[in-house]
């Protein structure tokens, strides 16, 4: 057999295959698209509102908008999935803090000193009124004398200070003095 003829046939097959492949990839704006991993019976979700003019590829701006919308939906979903839990008053530990934040509860750090008369009064009030701590709120009794890093992080300069933090450990609100009634008043 002639190798030139064989080479010509091979080149023609490659060209025809390439043209056929390119033709199969051309789509109209309204035609459903599929990826190699998708069945042809399941059209891919096309977002025509985020398409740009260079062949239907999403722009960085549209991708950022979609990511922000996804994160907002995920955040709402987490909040909606938090099972109602009676308010609690617990001793602080890094592990307890991590668990409560992961479960989506509102966390308030109570910087307590055992030698502080106001702290003793607040401590007794929280223990006596556990049923009045709002649902999904956890007050963590934090030792004022030994938790210097937390005091510095939240700018706590004296005992009997309360700091509400968000899921990322950022301060939401801060107040001095009080008990369950103050908690309800300042909680965000």
Image (cartoon, helix red, strand yellow):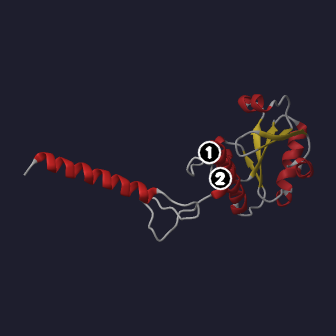
Which residue is identified by label 2?
50
Q: The residue tagged with tag 1: helix, strand or loop?
A: loop
Q: Earlier in the sequence, mark 1 or mark 2?
A: 2
Q: Which mark is residue 91?
A: none
Front-most of residues 126 and 161: 161
From where the camera sits, is residue 103 visible? no
**Looking at this view, is 17 or 98 the one in front?**
17
Residue found 66% across the figure and 43% down from its top: 61
Return the x and y of residue 116 as percentages of the image width and height. Answer: 87, 35
Q: Are marks 1 and 2 in contact (CB under 8 Å)?
A: yes
Measuring from the top left, give residue 105's x and y in whole percent: 73, 53
Extreme-bottom residue of the structure: 41
The residue at the point 80 percent across, 38 percent down is 111
Corner quadrant of residue 152: top right
Around disc 1, counting alpha carbons within 10 Å, would you say few (fewer than 14), some (14 to 19), or many (20 or more)? some
Q: Dot 2, how many residues are within 10 Å of its Cα: few (below 14), some (14-19), or many (20+)?
A: some
How far across and how far down the image is residue 69, in percent? 69, 53
Report, in whole angstroms, how far the alpha carbon at label 1 lies from the one at label 2: 8 Å
Q: Is residue 183 visible?
A: yes
Q: Which residue corresponds to the image point at 73% horizontal and 33% vertical from the top-left?
A: 150
Please, is residue 171 above or below residue 21 in the view? above
Q: Is residue 178 above or below residue 36?
A: above
Element carrying mark 2:
helix
Residue lying farthest left?
1
Image side of residue 167 versus residue 117, left or right: left
Count of marks overlaid on the render: 2
Q: Position of residue 53 (x, y in %)?
A: 61, 48
- From the viewer's side, name the closer residue of 75 and 127: 75
**Residue with the mark numbered 1:** 59
13 left or right, relative to 165: left
Residue at screen point 63% across, 57% down: 48
């Amino acid at each position: 057999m002639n190798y030139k003829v064989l080479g010509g046939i091979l080149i023609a097959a490659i060209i025809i295959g390439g043209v056929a492949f390119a033709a199969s990839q051309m789509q109209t704006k309204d035609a459903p698209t599929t990826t190699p991993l998708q069945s042809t019976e399941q059209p891919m979700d096309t977002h025509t509102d985020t398409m740009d003019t260079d062949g239907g590829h999403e722009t960085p701006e549209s991708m950022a908008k979609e990511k922000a919308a996804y994160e907002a939906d995920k955040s709402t979903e987490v909040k909606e999935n938090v099972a109602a839990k009676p308010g609690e008053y617990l001793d602080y530990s890094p592990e307890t803090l991590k668990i409560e934040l992961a479960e989506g509860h509102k966390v308030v750090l109570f910087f307590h000193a055992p030698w502080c008369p106001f702290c003793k009064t607040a401590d007794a009030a929280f223990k006596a009124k556990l049923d009045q701590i709002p649902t999904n709120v956890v007050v963590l009794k934090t030792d004022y004398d030994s938790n210097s890093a937390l005091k510095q992080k939240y700018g706590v300069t004296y005992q009997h200070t309360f700091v509400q933090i968000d899921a990322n450990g950022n301060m939401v609100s801060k107040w001095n003095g009080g008990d369950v009634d103050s908690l309800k008043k300042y909680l965000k």
